Amino acid sequence: MKKTGFTLIELLVVVAIIALLSGIVTVNFTKSRSKARDAKRVSDVGQIQLALELVFDRCNKYPPVAPSVATISIVTVCTKNGTNISINTFMTTVPTQQSAGTGDTTDYRYGVNATQNDYVLATRLENNSEVLNDDNDVTLHGITCTDGPPYNYCVTPR
């Protein structure tokens, strides 16, 4: 009488192959999520930079320094025709930095000079990226920007 079915060795080999492939996919997926968070940070910095430029266009100065970018959104920079001008005039919600899953939830960093006509806006990226070649590597207003590591993406007025 002939028995049909798989042997224990065959089943273990199949399970080992599936586990190996799952591990490879998981590692690649984790890297993709990290790069997506970095892309979101760069996009957020661009949006905040545009709002800062619109504030400067109306008030001829940038917002004063604040503990975080989220708190400068409510600071009135000037008043025009009875309307308080702040970043919230141009952005309904100022983005906050996404956690890397490591507990690091550092907000975007913002520094401005005493006359409020120059600023630096920075964020920390998780990965080395080509976008770091396009940013400003400066030390301004207490914020040091280097290409890494750590990877700091910084912008100044356009």
Image (cartoon, helix red, strand yellow):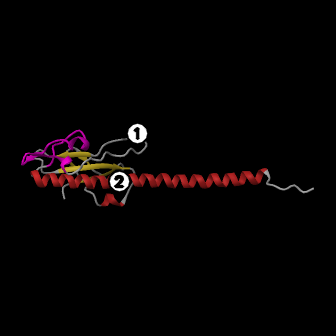
Give left or right: position of 74 versus 58: right
Q: Which residues are magenta?
A: 62-89
Question: Is mark 1 in CB contact (under 8 Å) with mark 2?
Answer: no
Which residue carries the number 2 mark? 40
Please give the count of numbered marks on the rendered protein: 2
Disc 1 marks a residue whose amino acid type is: Gly
Residue at 35% across, 41% down = 105
Secondary element at tag 2: helix
- Furthest residue in direction front, as rendered: 82
Q: Nearer the viewer, mark 1 or mark 2?
A: 2
Give left or right: position of 132 versus 54: right
- Distance from disc 1 to disc 2, alpha carbons, whole Å, reads 18 Å
In the figure, residue 77 lies in which quadrant? top left
Residue 55 in magenta stretch: no
Q: Nearer the viewer, residue 94 or 39?
A: 94
Within 10 angstroms of label 2, few (less than 14), some, or many (20 or more) residues?
Answer: some
Residue at 31% across, 45% down = 96
Q: Position of residue 153 (x, y in %)?
A: 30, 53
Disc 2 marks a residue whose amino acid type is: Lys
Which residue carries the number 1 mark? 103
Q: Position of residue 132 (x, y in %)?
A: 32, 57
Secondary element at tag 1: loop
In the figure, residue 24 lies in which quadrant? bottom right
Within 10 angstroms of label 1, few (less than 14), some, or many (20 or more) residues?
Answer: few
